[in-house]
């Protein structure tokens, strides 16, 4: 656990997260709009589903000829990591039900990943909401740009935008990887996930990556030199 | 993706977040030994997401310029480069290689 580098996310980090979600908003919504051909539904889905991977998983299964129920299940399962992230954050905070519910509904990888790096509840919650605000500023503006200018932008991967999200996630857990236990959790979690792709149903490899955290419990905490 | 599907996806995702927060969080709070597990889970899950988005096309291993971009990002993270430098470099390297 550390709070030196991210005691309060610096503006540069918040700007980077907003930029990441701006790129993600464009990338995802260009794809979704192309598939469902409705600006209104693309926008509402971006806002209320509140999970880009869920939308993409649903469309991927439908594109592959899968049935409605199979596509819905795939969409739900890939979002299960948000439940795990919410649980890990829920164990760190003691706030009222309404506040807890609001935090639950906004639990994503970056805001939980950065929040849990703090020791005090005040810092955890402050970091969570600041990162959440940055994420939404980027996501909403990127969604609008993706829907309005999707035809002009074309293939977002030609701009390297598909590398932005994983790079941002890597930067977010970079601090945690300097701890031996964190490194073990990450390496095993990533290995399990990649190893099970194509074997296990969509989303399940991500759930089973939690095994990395379980194994890392046996590793003493300590910063790598 | 009909309106009903949008609603169903939204409800399923929200339900998992709420269950995770209220049930999972409560279980972890009740058993203090799980506190460390709670702090390690995000690392394992986010690393898995990074690996999946970097090394695969979603279903199988895939060789792509994105991996070179992510390698550059990895070096910058290791060297503690600013966040914005990491993501801009990853995108620029990936796009540059694809343009070749």
Image: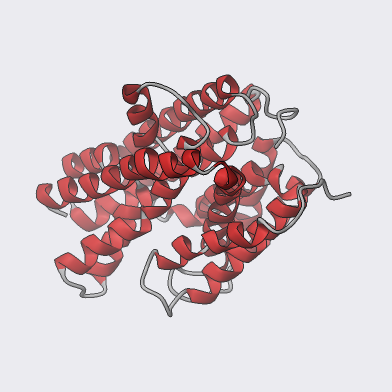
Vertical order, A167 against B98 (above or below) = above
Residue shown at 37% from the left, 35% from the top: A104
Question: Would residue A124 be found to the left or right of residue A154 on screen?
Answer: right
Question: Would residue A71 be found to the left or right of residue A197 on screen?
Answer: left
Observer able to see residue B69 = no
Check the image and name the residue furthest to the front.
Answer: B31
Check the image and name the residue furthest to the right.
Answer: A225
Rendering coords of residue A53 (x, y %): 37, 53
Question: Would residue B94 be found to the left or right of residue A85 on screen?
Answer: right
> Which coloring applies here?
secondary structure
Residue A216, quarter of the rendered image: bottom right
Query: Viewer-proximal residue, A106 or A184?
Result: A184
Check the image and name the residue furthest to the bottom.
Answer: A199
Residue shown at 20% from the left, 42% from the top: A39
Observer able to see residue B15 = yes
Vertical order, A79 against B32 (above or below) = below
Tally of numbered tags: 0
Rendering coords of residue A174 (x, y %): 69, 46
Vertical order, A152 against B52 (above or below) = above
Query: Viewer-proximal residue, A78 or A184?
Result: A184
Rendering coords of residue A197 (x, y %): 47, 74
Residue shown at 43% from the left, 73% from the top: B59
Residue B84, quarter of the rendered image: top right
Question: Would residue A88 be found to the left or right of residue B64 on screen?
Answer: left
Vertical order, A102 against B6 (above or below) = above
- The N terminus of chain A sits in image quarter: top right
Rendering coords of residue B40 (x, y %): 61, 49
């Amino acid at each position: 656990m550390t709070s030196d580098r991210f005691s309060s996310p610096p503006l540069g980090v918040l700007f980077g997260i907003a930029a990441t979600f701006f790129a993600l908003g464009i990338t995802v919504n260009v794809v979704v709009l192309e598939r469902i051909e409705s600006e209104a539904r693309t926008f509402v889905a971006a806002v209320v589903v509140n999970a880009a991977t869920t939308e993409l998983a649903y469309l991927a299964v439908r594109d592959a000829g899968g049935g409605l129920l199979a596509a819905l299940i795939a969409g739900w399962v890939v979002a299960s990591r948000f439940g795990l992230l919410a649980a890990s954050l829920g164990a760190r905070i003691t706030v009222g039900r309404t506040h807890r519910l609001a935090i639950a509904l906004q639990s994503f990888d970056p805001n939980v990943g950065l929040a849990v790096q703090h020791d005090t509840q005040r810092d955890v919650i402050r970091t969570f909401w600041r990162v959440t605000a940055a994420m939404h500023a980027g996501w909403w503006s990127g969604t609008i740009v993706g829907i309005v200018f999707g035809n002009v932008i074309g293939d977002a991967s030609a701009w390297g935008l598909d590398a932005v999200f994983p790079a941002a996630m890597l930067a977010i857990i970079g601090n945690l990887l300097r701890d031996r236990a964190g490194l073990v959790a990450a390496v095993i979690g990533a290995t399990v996930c990649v190893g099970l792709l194509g074997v296990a149903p969509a989303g399940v490899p991500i759930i089973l990556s939690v095994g990395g955290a379980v194994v890392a419990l046996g590793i003493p905490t300590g910063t790598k030199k | 993706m009909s309106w009903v599907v949008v609603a169903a996806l939204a409800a399923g995702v929200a339900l998992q977040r709420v269950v995770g927060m209220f049930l999972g969080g409560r279980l972890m709070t009740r058993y203090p030994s799980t506190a460390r597990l709670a702090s390690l889970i995000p690392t394992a899950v986010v690393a898995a997401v990074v690996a999946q988005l970097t090394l695969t096309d979603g279903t199988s291993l895939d060789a792509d310029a994105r991996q070179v971009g992510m390698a550059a990002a990895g070096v910058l993270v290791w060297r503690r480069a600013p966040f914005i430098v990491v993501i801009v470099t990853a995108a620029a390297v990936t796009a540059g290689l694809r343009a070749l």
